[in-house]
Image (spheres, coloured by chain):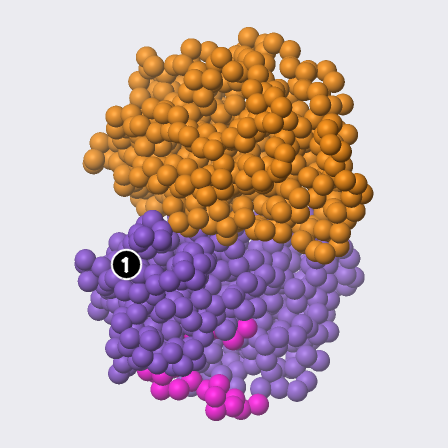
Chain colours: A purple, B orange
Amino acid sequence: MPSVLPLSAALLSLLTAAPKTPAPAAVTGPSPQVAERLIGAALTEGHAYARLAELTDGIGPRLSGSEGEKAAVAWAKRSFEADGVKVWLEPVKVPRWVRGTESGRVPGTERYREHRLALMALGGSVGTPAEGLTAEVIEVRSLEEVAALGEKVKGKVVLFNHSMSVAADYGKAAALRTRGASVAAKAGAVGMLVRSLATASLRSPHTGAMRYDEDGPRIPAAAVSVEDAELLHRLLAGGPVKVELKLGCQTLPDADSFNVVAEVPGREKPREVVLLGAHLDSWDVGTGAHDDGAGVVMVMEAARLIGKLKPAPRRTVRVVLFANEENGLKGGRAYAEAHAGELANHVAALEMDAGGFKPLGVALRAGPGGAELVAPWLKPLEALGAGSIVQGDAGGADISPLIPARVPFVGVKVDSSRYFDVHHSEADTLDKVDAKELAQATAAVAWVSYVLAEVPGVLPRPEAPLPAEAPKAPSAAPVGAPKPSAP
Amino acid sequence: MPSVLPLSAALLSLLTAAPKTPAPAAVTGPSPQVAERLIGAALTEGHAYARLAELTDGIGPRLSGSEGEKAAVAWAKRSFEADGVKVWLEPVKVPRWVRGTESGRVPGTERYREHRLALMALGGSVGTPAEGLTAEVIEVRSLEEVAALGEKVKGKVVLFNHSMSVAADYGKAAALRTRGASVAAKAGAVGMLVRSLATASLRSPHTGAMRYDEDGPRIPAAAVSVEDAELLHRLLAGGPVKVELKLGCQTLPDADSFNVVAEVPGREKPREVVLLGAHLDSWDVGTGAHDDGAGVVMVMEAARLIGKLKPAPRRTVRVVLFANEENGLKGGRAYAEAHAGELANHVAALEMDAGGFKPLGVALRAGPGGAELVAPWLKPLEALGAGSIVQGDAGGADISPLIPARVPFVGVKVDSSRYFDVHHSEADTLDKVDAKELAQATAAVAWVSYVLAEVPGVLPRPEAPLPAEAPKAPSAAPVGAPKPSAP
Ligand SMILES: [Zn+2]
Ligand SMILES: [Zn+2]
C-alpha cells in the first residue's frame, strides 16, 4: 500500500503540470485551472482539518436531541455563512435517547472470581431496573441460531459473539447488533449483548443503533468489548455463566432538530442539483471525528471552494448535513420528503461517511454509460491515487431514501480499513484523523463535485431499484442498518 | 522480524535432531536429552497457557492487599503442590491502596464544550475531596521544566505530556509518572496528570506507581489517556483550560501477604541456588496477563518440568513469586532480607517481567567470562530464535535488591515491543497473550534455568555495584521506578 503522500512541492507541481491554456469564453466542461485551484487549495490550506478541530474539540459529541447537536447545527450554519455560502435549516424531528450511567459484571462463582465487563448500551435500548438485571448467558453466532436454540434462550442474556475482524465484515455483524435484541426477545431472552463491531480493541466497547420490533418485547441491549466477549466465551466453556447488567439508558420525547442545507447556485442550470451529503450527528461517545466529522468538513470545504469559483459551475452544488443518521435516519427521510418534487432534477448524490482517510477512487451507482461520462475527468486526481473509477457500490444511509427517485450516486471511496478501530467508540477523536489524508480526500470530493456540476452531460439514472432495495414503511425501514457500502 | 513459529512437526524434529546418545553415568553438563524433554514439553503441552488462563480468567486482578491477591497466593501454592514441587510462603507486609470511583472532565467554556477525560488514578495517589478538585492545567514535558516555571505552577494541575511512542521510551517517561506529583507539589501544584505510558491507545488510560517525598505535600495524581493528553495540549493552545478531577482512591493500613517460594533441590550442590523470579501481584485493572501473569506461569512451568527430571540438576532451582512488585517492591526486599545469609550462594537470578512474548535471546549481568560459560549451551534454543547472547542488561525490579550481594543476573529477553500497548491498563487480558509465543518463551526459560543449574562452572559474579545502583534507605529507594531493562 502506498504510504501517505506528503504535501510536497513535487506533488503540487505534478498537479499543476496540466497545460495552462486560457479558459475559453464558453466553458464546455471542467477546466484544468479549476482543478489547480480546488485541489491546490484543499491540499495546502488545511481548512478542512481546522474545521474538524472546531467540530470535535470545540463541540464534541452531538447525539440527536442533545445540546451538542444543537451547538453543531449553529456552528455549521455560522460556518457556511462565514464562507459566503447560502445556508438554511430544514426542520427534522429526531429521537432523543440518553445513555445514563451503565455497568456490567460477571459475578464470581466457585470457578472464577468476579470480572468487570467493559460495555456500552446500544442506542435505542431500554434500560434495566435500577438494581440491575442478572441472568445466565447463552452464546450464539447468528440470528438464526437463536431460533434453533428454542426453549434454551428463555430467561437468558443472549451474547451475539460474531467473528468480525476486518472492515468488510461490518455489514454482516451490524445485523446482529441492530436486530439481535428483537430476535432474542421474541425467543424469551431477557437481555442481549453483542461483541463490539471492532477491528481493534483495547477493552474498548463500540456502541451503535439497534431497533425493536414494533410489536415485540423490548429487552436491554449492550455491546461488550471484544475482550469481554472472548472472556465470556472462555468462561462458558467451563459451565454456566451469569452476567449482571445495569443500564441507565432511556428514550425521551422526540426533539426538534434540523438538516443544515447550503448551496452554490448553478450559473446555467440552477435547478439541476448535485447533492453532497454527510451527517452532522454523532454518537454520544468520542467526538465523532471520523464518523462523521470528517465527511462534514469535506463537503463543507467542497462548497466553500466551489463557491469561490467565478463563474460558478453549470449546476447547483448543494450540501446537506443530515440530522440523525446514527439512530433514526430521520434527516435523510425528511430531506427526501421535503424535496420530493425536485428529486427528478437531482443529477447526482454523493455521501461521505466512511472516515477521513486517503481517497482510493470514485465509485458509481448509475445507469449504463455513467463511468464513461465521469472517468475522463478524473485525471487531476491521479497524483492522489484516486484518479480511477473503482468497483463497489456508491451510496450512504442518508441518501438511501433517494433510491426510489433513481438519483445517481457517486462515491469518493476512502481507505476505511482502520475505520472500525474507533467507529462508535470513545476513541473516535481528532488525533485519529491524519490531516494529510483528510486534505487528500477533501481535494477529491471538491474536484468530483465540480466535475458533476460542470460536465456537459448528466449521469444516466440507474435502473429502477429492486423491490428489496426500496425503503419500506417507516416502522420496518432499516433504521441504523448497515450502510450500503463502507458504512 | 520473523513471524511467530508454529509448533509444527518440522520445528519439533529440528529440536530433537540432537544426537540421542545415552546419558553418561556421571553427568558433566546439561544434556541434549534434557533439552528435548524440557523444550518439547514446553512447546507441546500448553501447560503455561492453561495456567495463565486460571490466573487471569479464574482469579483476575490481584493488587497488593486485595482479595484477588490472596486468591492468587493460594492458587500458586496449590499449583506447585499439584506439580509435586516443594512450596512455602514467606510473609511480606504490603501497602493496600484502593482505587474507588474516579472521573475527570474539562468543564466547558466559551471556546469549547465540556469533555470527559479518560483517566485512572496512579497507584499510591491520595484522593481528591468528594466534590472534586478544579484547577487550571499547565503543561510540561519534564521534571526540570516544572522548576523552571516557578510561580506559574502554583495552584495548577501539572500535565506531564511526554512523547513516549515506543517501548524503549518507557524508562524515561516512567520517571515523570513516579516522581511528577512530588516535583509538582513542591512547586505549589494542586494536582498532577501524566500522559499514559502507552505505545497504543484507544482512549485507554494506563495506571502505574507513583510515590511522594516523605516530607513533601501530597497532591492527587492520575494518568490520562494519550488522546486526552493531546486534547488538553490542543485546547491549551487557545488559552487557559481547567480540569475537574474526582479521585476516590485511598491508602488503607498495610496488609499481610506472602512471597510464594518453591524449589527443586539440587542433587549435588543443593545450597547453590538458581533463582527464577516473577511477580504475582498485578494492578487492579485488566487481569495482569502480560504483567506479570506470563512471567509467573513461565517460571512455574520451568520448575514443574525441571522437577520431573531424574536425576535433578546439580544445583537447586528456586522459584520466587514475589508479592507487591507494582506498588512497593516489598516482596523483593523481604526476600533479600530473609535470605541475606544465602545470597553468596545464589549463583544466578532470572526475572521474567516483560510480557509473554517470543524469546529473542539471553542477556547477562555477570563478571568477565560469563558469556563464555553460558553461550555454548544455548544451541537448543536456536530453532526458537533465542540461541544467542544478546546485548542489554539482565535484571528485574524484584531481584534488584540482590545487586549488593553481586548475584549474577540472567535474562531471557522477549520481544516487548507491544508490551506497552496494554501494560497497566484494562486491556492487559489473556487474549493479548499468544499461546505460541508464551510456549516458546517458557521453553527458553526452562532450558536456561536448567543450564544454570547443571553447568559445571558458575557464572563469575559481577563487579561490585556502583554506589548509584545500590538500594538506598527504604524511603528513598526507587519504589515503582522503571525496572532495569524491559520493565
Ligand atoms: Zn456515520
Ligand atoms: Zn510487572
Compared to B465, does B143 lie above or below? below
Magenta residues, as a range?
A: A463-486
Residue located at (44% from left, 58% from top): A234
| Quadrant of the frame with the N terminus of chain B | top right
**Would residue A465 be counted in the magenta stretch?**
yes
Q: Is residue A245 magenta?
A: no
Residue A32, given in percent of the width and then of the height, sits at 71, 64
Residue lying at 42% horizontally and 85% vertically, measured from the top left = A471
Residue visible at 72% across and 63% down?
Answer: A382
Of the 4 image quadrants, the one containing the C terminus of chain B is: top right
List x then y, in percent, for residue B208.
Answer: 42, 32
* Residue B281 drawn above or below residue B154: below
Q: How crowded is mark 1: few (under 14 residues within 10 Å), some or many (20 or more)?
A: many
Image position, residue B216 (x, y; %): 33, 15
Count of numbered circles in the view = 1
Q: Which chain carries label 1?
A: A
Circle 1 residue: A244
Q: Which residue lies furthest to the front in this view?
A: B25
The chief SS type of the magenta part is: loop
Q: Report the side of A441 relative to A100 (left or right).
A: right
Residue B376 is left or right of residue A335, and the answer is right
Answer whether residue A221 is visible to the viewer in this image. no
- Image point (29%, 75%), residue name: A154
Query: Which residue occupies the foreground of this view, B453 or B185?
Result: B453
The quadrant in which residue A274 appears is bottom right
Amino acid on which the number 1 mark rests in the picture: Glu
